[in-house]
Image (spheres, coloured by chain):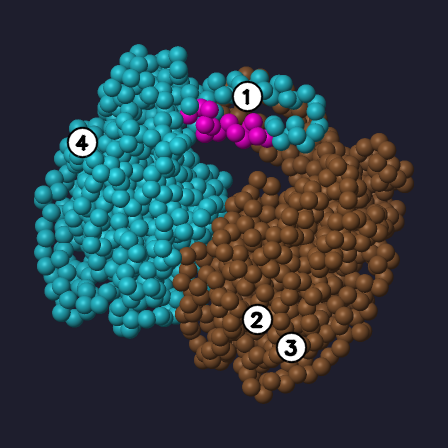
Chain colours: A brown, B cyan
Amino acid sequence: MVKKYTFGTPFNTGAIVEDIKAESTPVPYFEINTDEGISFSCKLADKDIVYGLGEATRGINKRGYVYNSYCSDDFCHMETTKSLYGAHNFILVEGKKTFGAFFDYPTRLTFDIGFTKADTMRIYCDKADIDVYIIEGSAPLEIVKEFRKVIGKSYVPPRWAMGYMQSRWSYYTADAVREVAKNYRKESIPLDAIFLDIDYMDEYKDFTVSDERFGDLPQLIDEMKAEGIRLVPIIDAGVKIEKGYDIYEEGLEKGYFCVDKDGKPFSAGVWPGLTHFPDFLNEEAGLWFGLKYKALTDLGIEGFWNDMNEPAIFYSEKGIERFYEKLAEITNGDKSVDNYNKIKDIVNGLQNSQEDYNSIYHKVNGKLVKHNDIHNMYGYKMTECTAKALEKLRPEERTLLFSRASYVGMHRSAGIWTGDNFSWWSHILLELKQLPALNMCGFLYVGADLGGFGCDASRDLVLRWLGLGIFTPLMRNHAALCTRDQECYQFENPEDFKNIIELRYRLLPYLYSEFLKCAENDEMFFKPLGFEYKDDEVARSCEDQLFVGNELMIAPVYTQNALGRYVYLPEDMRAVRLKKGGELQFEDMPKGHHFVEIPLHEVVFFIRKDKCIPLAKSALSTDAMDFDTLRLIGFEGAKYELYTDDGISSDLNKIEKKIWEN
Amino acid sequence: MVKKYTFGTPFNTGAIVEDIKAESTPVPYFEINTDEGISFSCKLADKDIVYGLGEATRGINKRGYVYNSYCSDDFCHMETTKSLYGAHNFILVEGKKTFGAFFDYPTRLTFDIGFTKADTMRIYCDKADIDVYIIEGSAPLEIVKEFRKVIGKSYVPPRWAMGYMQSRWSYYTADAVREVAKNYRKESIPLDAIFLDIDYMDEYKDFTVSDERFGDLPQLIDEMKAEGIRLVPIIDAGVKIEKGYDIYEEGLEKGYFCVDKDGKPFSAGVWPGLTHFPDFLNEEAGLWFGLKYKALTDLGIEGFWNDMNEPAIFYSEKGIERFYEKLAEITNGDKSVDNYNKIKDIVNGLQNSQEDYNSIYHKVNGKLVKHNDIHNMYGYKMTECTAKALEKLRPEERTLLFSRASYVGMHRSAGIWTGDNFSWWSHILLELKQLPALNMCGFLYVGADLGGFGCDASRDLVLRWLGLGIFTPLMRNHAALCTRDQECYQFENPEDFKNIIELRYRLLPYLYSEFLKCAENDEMFFKPLGFEYKDDEVARSCEDQLFVGNELMIAPVYTQNALGRYVYLPEDMRAVRLKKGGELQFEDMPKGHHFVEIPLHEVVFFIRKDKCIPLAKSALSTDAMDFDTLRLIGFEGAKYELYTDDGISSDLNKIEKKIWEN
């Protein structure tokens, strides 16, 4: 049961697709205060868990910290980071009282979840214009399903996008891409896609291709496709200001760019230098931009990745002018620490500044709206426009699409990756914690940069991260400029990587089937243990294990030099151990606590009691796989309902469902 | 057995106090390469553990990363940080071969411990002037003891310095200090010291006291002492350049400051603005500076804290001049991303720059030595000079002294705290991992900023951190400017904090006795489980439990919202549980894996098989404690040898040893 409570005149975010009438009764569960903006307070009992907040940092249980829902480009996010790339305002309290709440509000919203006062949750924002949805149900999963019902069905990618994918900022030339493919094939490591980061473009201009470095892109695309490898280019939000560049000229002429308070296009420095931002809140502008992807789909591109769409701003044109003025004032020879600190603050305050976000305007239904007031809509609307255009450009087939910035509602159009992260062991665990919370908000096609984007990765880090990554729908290894090469073949004994990635492909029939089910039935692909065992205190407090689909539980290793790890089984399960060389070993384990040895080159996962899963043979790509010849593993007599389709058709009614029995 | 191998003409760091003759045979265990500087390579077997590196980041087992031994002020250190405040070049390989190695080298030394190649450890530095000590023994602890024997006995603080201490940057006035004391006493939470951060001084000038804010410091000291509370002021390395300031004038006149290549005093911006650095490598200068502490000891001060002695440099005078010139060139209206990045790099590269460390010179035995060539000596020598002077100023009593920067050898003069950290859960675990490695290098009086220095702390974080902190010899709660107040009385239900801190005081007879034993016998206060159970693979790989002294094992909770944690007992033990209100409950637990519930307000620790420990009654300060009336807890029939003394005498021969039987 979802009830809506409206305060003031909320901005229509489009997150909710059902037509729900606002209640006239007070919001239950919360005390409301409107002295300053609006705040919603709620007491928490000692054992209450607060789930949710999608991509946010910290625990599966969000208690004990403050989160700002404000899409932010934060490369180096730590446990005290308050905002990440996406804004996902859904929470679910489970305990003495159990309910869900979605705060539909397009910009900064703060969730103080027992930080200022340990027993109090307080959610607040600047303006009392907000829709609050209260969701009730018999259990956490029911509440999530109720919520998902009103936010609309989740995006389903083509099946190949659930293969293993390799990325790097950057493969600078077509030959560099060929080299990656060649090395993967040489080591017989499965690979379904290679990503093109910003350097495939001509001077970072969207929808252009560097003639010098990727002059033979059409041929490269065909060559790769013949190998079962798709190329996935990046598209950034900012359009380079450059005379003669058609996107720039057209956008300018048609008034499709965001403006400043005087109505002039707003200029911001991003990768290409000064750019304008397409006004994705203006539907016409958004569709115009979306249809530009044709330049690449015409070449045979079947997937995209929208980036820098918080939008990330290095500096605005006005900002850098003011900055030069301020610096001139301040670089006066004063050697005091105060002056030095001032300079540091000015320089480091230039990026993603509140001042800039306050200077950008959108045209929404003919009215100017300040960007900061709808900040969290930007990447969402960019990607929604992209998806709508891609439906026109490629009506028969699903296109791979994911985005960095997002808001609830975007899950209907695309997936997300969890943005730039680091080669940190703690970011393996962070990913695990983000996954179920993202599912709650409808984002099913999700995953992190495996091996970590920033910093240098060690061999063992990449291997262990793959041990989680083989279960995430989006499975991409990605690394940043100036970091150590981390393609699997760069390390000693690539056969260990091959073995683990092959397990992903063997599991694909299951993972893909579960994904389709979750999309169809508003289910969660990743569930916290407490969702199924809410009277089991150990399961409820478990922060490092997940159910994957309805049949599996995972407990990946996320610490260095570990012999193994502790695993809690909330029920009897059958452990499946991938050995070196690919053999699977099985061991029945009783409900309870276990220390499970998991050598670096092995993966262990668990089949739930009385369940079974289908396994395929691995192949070098999903294209080369036989999805019909399957064997079941798991408990005797168990049944599995397999969802299959051709892996690519837009028409999801073509999904076939068949029950297999072990 | 410690053997010395000399390459080139090493700088005499003074780390080793025994006179060891260099061997003429090749260094065992390592392959040496002198193509560029010098490097020492060694193959590691799969299960070899590499212990050591003192304060370094990451695991108890250092495998899988690269560490730079180069004293660095890194406020925001993460898992990929390569250098911290101290430089501790001792490693201990345990496994197929077991040996220790100390690389006595006064500046940057890199330890690539299976990062570049998983099976290879490579240690290298720029100049082939180095003493390498290879230490062999029957077991890890024996090797540590052999090493400790040649580096000299560890510093022993006064007993009150093992009480609970409160700090903040800053308590700005004498009344603010009184307020802290009053609040602790009001809540009956034990407290032995309050720290004075940089603002007690007059414009950050060492050995001055702000007349305006601390005009009645002598009276404050007396008042506090009457309450059992000592004041501990900070001393920074840089001496403010200010006409008429006696320290500056004298230092200048006597040539006691570090110089630039032209022999002029080197000027660097730190808290006071431009300063000169006393040349602690010049013994005469060091003693001169050390005797200046008299200004404070004369007022009754009994403890100090040396800070900013890497030395941290915000900018050098020359650096900021160059910076202004460069900025003038570059702030030319160019709005390109390249130019913006250049400016960012210039501004952010100003701090602790290699260029500056290359521009500072010391006078060592009459010769000019470039600072960068002996960088890791600076904080060490500052603190050694301080300790020598304090022995003259306060010959009868031990003085509390700890430092931020350090090198092996400084452990004879003082303790260290692990420097500025963050209110991160991961920094609780980091502290745990640093503790035994610091002990290996002789640093026994150690601890981290409890509750975290940077960032805002939550109540549960502080409580859980105290759960580890009650076992660390240095037990100080410290927080930075602009962060949330984190004195225990600032949170709800301070009685929960009181209960845990009182446990520290109840344990003090044991902790102090074990500390004295470790200092006397070159033992480790904190031991990894693998040190005692080296054939037990689970114990060997344990990264979150420690032995404390010879009788206890700890397994603190370091994750948020945890119900408890997994604990591995390598032998039968008796769990001791501190309940709310102070009751202790006991439970015998067999060797093996356990999930132990540990509610937020409880602490659980473990008494080892057939051991017992003495407990005292808590009091508001160590001064008020009765150290004679003790009871034993633990296994029946067990004996404990108690070391006691008056807690303050410099003469450690006065220690009494008495065997108690349970």
Q: Which of A111 and A163 is in front in this view?
A: A163
Chain ID of residue with mark 1: B
Q: Which amino acid does label 2 sit on?
A: Phe
Question: Which is more foreground, mark 4 or mark 3?
Answer: 3
- Say if the magenta span includes residue B345: yes
Q: Distance between the residues labelled 1 and 2?
A: 55 Å
Residue B626 image position (x, y, % from top left): 17, 54
Q: Which residue carries the number 2 mark?
A: A547
- Residue B123 visible in the shown view: yes
Chain ID of residue with mark 4: B
Q: In this view, does A259 lie above or below A613?
A: above
Q: What residue type is labelled 1?
A: Phe
Magenta residues? B344-357
Q: Which amino acid does label 4 sit on?
A: Glu
Q: Quadrant of residue B283?
A: top left
Residue occupying the point 80% across, 74% down: A654
Q: Please tell me the numbered disc located at residue B323.
A: 1
Q: Which residue carries the number 4 mark?
A: B391
First reached walking from the N terminus: tag 4 or tag 1? 1
Residue A95 image position (x, y, % from top left): 55, 71
Q: Which residue carries the number 3 mark?
A: A630
Q: How far apart are marks 4 and 1 (CA)?
A: 43 Å
